[in-house]
Amino acid sequence: KQYDVVLVGKGNAALCAALAARDEGASVAMLEAASQDESGGNSRFAGGVMRFAYASVDDLKRVTDLTDAEVADSDFGTNTTDEFFDDLFRLTSFRTDPTLSEMLVTQSLDTMVWLRSKGVKFVPNFGRQSALVNGKRRFFGRLPIEASGGGAGLVQVLDKAAGAAGIDVFYSTRAKRLIQDGDRVVGVQASAAGKPVEFMAKAVVLACGGFEANPEMRARYLGAGWELAKVRGSRYNQGDGIKMALAIGAQPTG
């Protein structure tokens, strides 16, 4: 099977990457280890609260349909790019990649607008990130907006957009190994219903989550006792992407 881009995984990150590639005219395939009913990765279990840069209510109106009453009765605060950078650097003690940090902060609002263009509905986060203070709704944590329906709703909408865009999704298909030509990754070897299958591509994107559901990897990388931890989320997050990348010499950190 030949594609321009192959995505491993089918959560929010994978769906966004697939849609972005499709926007550029690429043929795209997604390999999802889970069945269709269990697809969506850990994004399905997330709250859907979105952190992005915004300087005013006008910025928020680019993302969601705020009513006049909601604007009048609420103090949405701000999360300017400077505030976003300050929070990021404070929480990481400045140990963060400068290029990725710049992209994350400065492109976050435009990314929210792009998500909205794909059909995602965002609503004020009244439930978990706000409180009444002197008769006015105030938000805390610089998190005033969430995806309607939480993480499950976000995945559902992006799933529909992927179908409309003509992206091929292969369920119950677990990626096993990256295929190389010299020092280039040119495809993925996978297992579908117990049978081997190869997907060749000009680019491969690993967006298949971490190793939350893998007790052995939790114990190895987090320490003794972590194999006994009870974790929420998808049982399919087995660390496949990490293992495939390490097998061809990827850096384990940084």
Image (cartoon, rainbow, N blue to C red):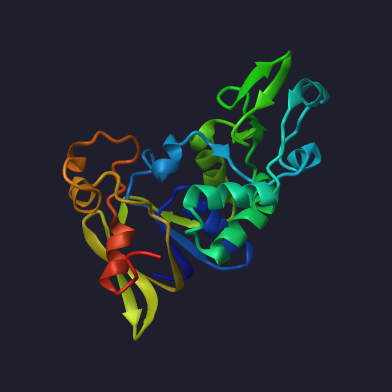
> In the image, what residue occupies the spot 25% across and 49% down?
222
Residue 172: % across, % down: 31, 50
Quadrant position of residue 20: bottom right
Indicate whether 105 appears above or below 25: above
Residue 117: % across, % down: 69, 48
Indicate whether 139 appears above or below 22: above
Closer-to-camera residue (188/98)? 98
From where the camera sits, is residue 175 visible? no
Q: Is residue 90 left or right of residue 71?
A: left
> In the image, what residue occupies the spot 59% across and 43% down?
51
Residue 81: % across, % down: 68, 51
Residue closest to the far top: 135
From where the camera sits, is residue 5 visible? yes
Q: Is residue 106 left or right of residue 177?
A: right
Question: Which quadrant is home to the C terminus?
Answer: bottom left
Closer-to-camera residue (57/203)? 57
Residue 36: % across, % down: 39, 43
> In the image, what residue occupies the spot 48% across and 35% down?
152
> In the image, what residue occupies the spot 61% across and 60% down?
103
